[in-house]
Amino acid sequence: MARHDIASAARKLALLIPRLGSPFNGEQLATVAAIERVLKSNGSDWHDLADAITADRRKVSLRTNSPRRKPAPAPWRPAIRALLASAAPLLLWERQYCCQCLFNVQRLSSKQRRCLEDILRQYGGRAA
């Protein structure tokens, strides 16, 4: 089978691939399925993705033409990481909420910020 150029799907793949690092198996599986749909819609497969990742950067690049700046690190992330690493007796929903915010949220809404501040305050962490 001829290998396809997956550069046209790079933007979608770049949004999906980080979600593979989720701590939730269901989200990881859903992400794999979503990546496969993007690849198939482009006429590509996993082999094309692997080729693009390992190919000479001059020939194939997953980056889009416009350079993306990395967002500034969120000041609340270290507080959540420290809380999750501590022995704090978090409730299941609190632990899941902190993980979701840590892995899936670039910017906190005011409601998310208040919720995290309450959780951090309750367990002695820094305010978000």
Image: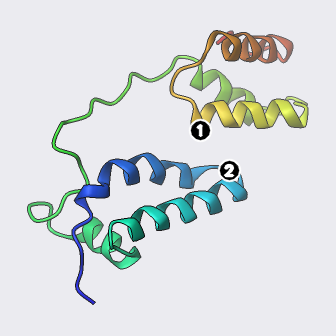
| Picture layout, residue 108 above or below residue 38 | above
Q: Residue furthest left?
A: 58
Q: Secondary structure at mark 1?
A: helix
Residue 126 visible in this rendered orientation of the protein: no
Give the image quarter of residue 1: bottom left
* C-beta proximity under 8 Å, tags 2 and 1: yes
Q: Residue furthest bottom?
A: 1
Q: Name the spot of residue 114 as percent of width and height, x first.
A: 72, 9
* Residue placed most toward the observer, 72 or 62: 62
In this picture, residue 103 sits left or right of residue 114: left
Count residues near mark 1 (Cα–Cα under 10 Å), then give few for <14, some for 14-19, many for 20+: some
Residue 66 visible in this rendered orientation of the protein: yes
The residue pinned by badge 2 equals: 23
Residue at 29% from the left image edge and 65% from the top image edge: 53
Give the image quarter of residue 6: bottom left
Q: Name the spot of residue 74 as percent of width and height, x first.
A: 50, 21
- Looking at the picture, which amino acid does disc 1 mark? Phe
Q: Name the spot of residue 64 as percent of width and height, x first.
A: 22, 46
Q: Name the spot of residue 82 as percent of width and height, x first.
A: 68, 28
The residue pinned by badge 1 equals: 103
Residue at 80% from the left image edge and 18% from the top image edge: 119
Count residues near mark 2 (Cα–Cα under 10 Å), then give few for <14, some for 14-19, many for 20+: few
In this picture, residue 96 sits left or right of residue 76: right
- Looking at the picture, which amino acid does disc 2 mark? Pro
Q: Upstream in the sequence, badge 2 or badge 1? A: 2
| Picture layout, residue 62 above or below residue 100 | below
Q: Secondary structure at mark 2?
A: loop
Residue at 66% from the left image edge and 53% from the top image edge: 27
Give the image quarter of residue 4: bottom left
Q: Residue furthest front?
A: 41
* Residue placed most toward the observer, 23 or 84: 23
Residue at 21% from the left image edge and 68% from the top image edge: 5
